[in-house]
Amino acid sequence: MPSAAILAGGDARRFDGRDKSRLPVGGRSILERQLDALAGITDDVMLVGARSAGDGRAHAAPIRIVADRVPASGPLGGLDAALAAARFDDVLLLACDMPFVTTEFLAYLMSQAGDADAVVPATVRGYHPLCAVYSRRCHAAVAEALAARQLRMTELLKRICVREIGVDDIGRFGPPTRLLANVNTPAEFDELEALPGHKP
């Protein structure tokens, strides 16, 4: 079983500072949708960088609020906090603005962990490191990158052993553009319904 960490920190400057995890998609917040997807995978769910459990209070499984250990370090700092607090050796890392991930897809990523340090989807847009699995084995590399202030997640992937999940494998679970869609701006939020294979 993995732990799961939803990255809920950040100031969402491109979204006027709004909490993107609370945005409604198909009548439910993104956070609610993600918690439903994770319910079939793990009972150790962390909200990293969040100030409160928010919508998670409505769910039976306890949700832990985990603070960043290295402030102002972006998703890499969130991964560091998650790896330090995780109850299991693998951490399924998920950005809080991805409404269409599914239990089946996330479980598949977990099943590919094996002896890799990370399991990361890759499409024509490149790696998707904020919907990926990280082993506790890569924590030292994360700490080194933080110490050097090399905060880009793609730079971390150069330091560790990555198992890449390509579009053919991703496509078994739905259109990759939909499964890996995230919401950075109000315009992207408005465009969600135009994604291939969209369902509320």
Image: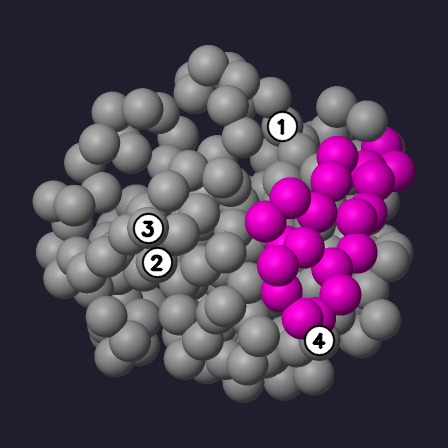
User: What residue is shown with label 1?
Assistant: 10
Nearer the observer, 109 or 183: 183
What span is colored magenta in the figure?
51-70
Q: CA distance from mark 3 to mark 1?
A: 24 Å
Q: CA distance from mark 1 to mark 4?
A: 25 Å
Picture coordinates of residue 172 (x, y %)?
25, 79
Nearer the observer, 171 or 47: 47
Q: CA distance from mark 3 to mark 4?
A: 24 Å
User: Hey, what amino acid is under mark 1?
Assistant: Gly
User: What residue is shown with label 4?
Assistant: 43
**In the figure, 4 relative to 151: above or below?**
below
Indicate the secondary structure of the residue bearing disc 3.
loop
For label 1, the crowd category at 10 Å Cα-Cα, with few meaning under 14, some 14 to 19 and many 20 or more, is some
Task: Please report whichever mark, 1 or 2, sits nearer to the chain's N-terminal start.
Answer: 1
The answer to whether one can see residue 185 in this image is yes
Asked if residue 171 lies left or right of residue 84, the reply is left
Image quadrant assignment for residue 2: bottom right
User: Hey, what amino acid is under mark 2?
Assistant: Phe
Task: Please report whichever mark, 2 or 4, sits nearer to the chain's N-terminal start.
Answer: 4
User: Hey, what amino acid is under mark 4?
Assistant: Asp
Give the numbered dot on residue 100: 2
